[in-house]
Image (cartoon, rainbow, N blue to C red):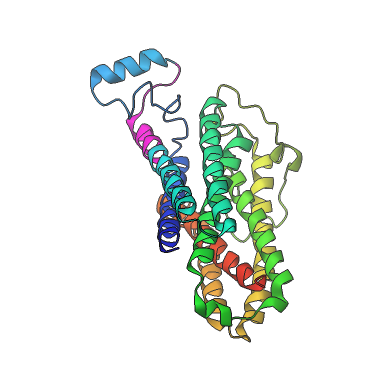
Amino acid sequence: MINIRNISLFGGLFAIVVIALGAWTRLVDAGLGCPDWPGCYGFVTFPITDSEIALAESRYPTFPYEIDKAIPEVVHRYFAAMLGLIAIFLVFFAIRYKVDSSLRNLSIFLLFFICCQGLFGYLTVSLKLLPIIVTGHLFGGFITLSLFFFIFLKAADFRFLHYIDIRKYKYLALACLIVLLVQIFLGAWTSTNYASLACPDFPTCQGSYYPEMDFESGFNLKQEVGPNYLYGLLENPARVAIHYSHRVTALVLTFFMLILIGCLWFTNAAPLSSTLGLVLLLQISLGIMNVVYVLPLYIAIAHNLIAAMLLLVTLLVNYLAFKK
């Protein structure tokens, strides 16, 4: 079990790095930094010399080469591929040491899921940043992290966790997890549709608490991408509808989370309550800073990472609440 525990821990930490790299790639508009997959303009890494760049542009004349966008895309791809290698090791040790069948099956499912993530990576490029594909790919990164984390928890089987009894709050914990997953999906949809700055003010949006919005266009899952979807094609009311929905769901999530935090505080899970509260506060602060300071790169990346942390803490609460 020691190998499964260590590999899953390493995989989880590596998945966090991949999420950060994915956010970096998206925020610098490098999603099409390489118009082909898995290579980059037909190269294993990316063109560097003048002759390589000339060859690259002759292969893809409609995609002028920009090394500043190719680098994030290639780095993200190779780090994501490493996750698959880690999952292969996880499956190997799970089978070799004949671990518990649930752990073995989880490990196999994780490897399958990462392969699906690779397929979504290919579709992201081949379908020219089709929003539903890109959003699914981003959301899948969080699911990958969650699977590594869950395997780690089961393999480590920390003894002190057995003394925490919060089973009476399991439905509240589940409600928080569901709303959080919806919020993460909306965050990905907001970023995918370039709606992060659709509301440039806070707490109002476009100077109003209920601005003009087009929900039908904003949440149309069958959007046209044109030549490609770089920088988005939606009109401003549609982007405002997406951004506004993300804000409103954040309020709903905060409401549920505060109730859960209060309930946990009066149990023997008070440290978990404090952790959840601090991570939630940090995430809200980063979200506000993204608007006020016009989406600074490192704050936006941190917003993604703290969302991942909030998901892990919420998963831990649910793991304890539903344990037998």
Q: Is residue 319 visible?
A: yes
Image: 143 above or below 120? below
Dominant SS of magenta comes to helix
> Where residue 262 appears, x then y in whole percent?
65, 80
Q: Quadrant of the C terminus?
A: bottom right
- The image quadrant that residue 178 belongs to is bottom right
Image point (34%, 23%), residue name: 43
Q: Is residue 209 magenta?
A: no
* Residue 272, horizontal then vertical, whole percent: 55, 77
Tell whether 41 sits left or right of 120.
Answer: left
- Report whether residue 251 is seen: no
Up-down: is 174 above or below 106? below
Question: Residue at (63%, 87%) from the top-left corner?
Answer: 266
Question: Picture coordinates of residue 104 (x, y %)?
Answer: 54, 53
Q: Residue at x 55, y 35 (%)?
A: 120
Q: Quadrant of the N terminus?
A: bottom left
Who is closer to the viewer here, 160 or 16? Answer: 160
* Magenta segment boundaries in residue numbering: 62-76
Residue 226, how many percent across, how many down? Answer: 60, 23
Q: Nearer the viewer, residue 32 or 116?
A: 116
In this picture, residue 251 sits left or right of residue 272:
right
The answer to whether residue 168 is above or below residue 74 is: below
Q: Is residue 283 above or below residue 114?
A: below
Q: How many marks?
A: 0
Task: Say which residue appears at 61% left-offset and 44% top-offset.
Answer: 189
Q: Residue furthest top?
A: 58
**Residue placed most toward the observer, 32 or 298:** 32
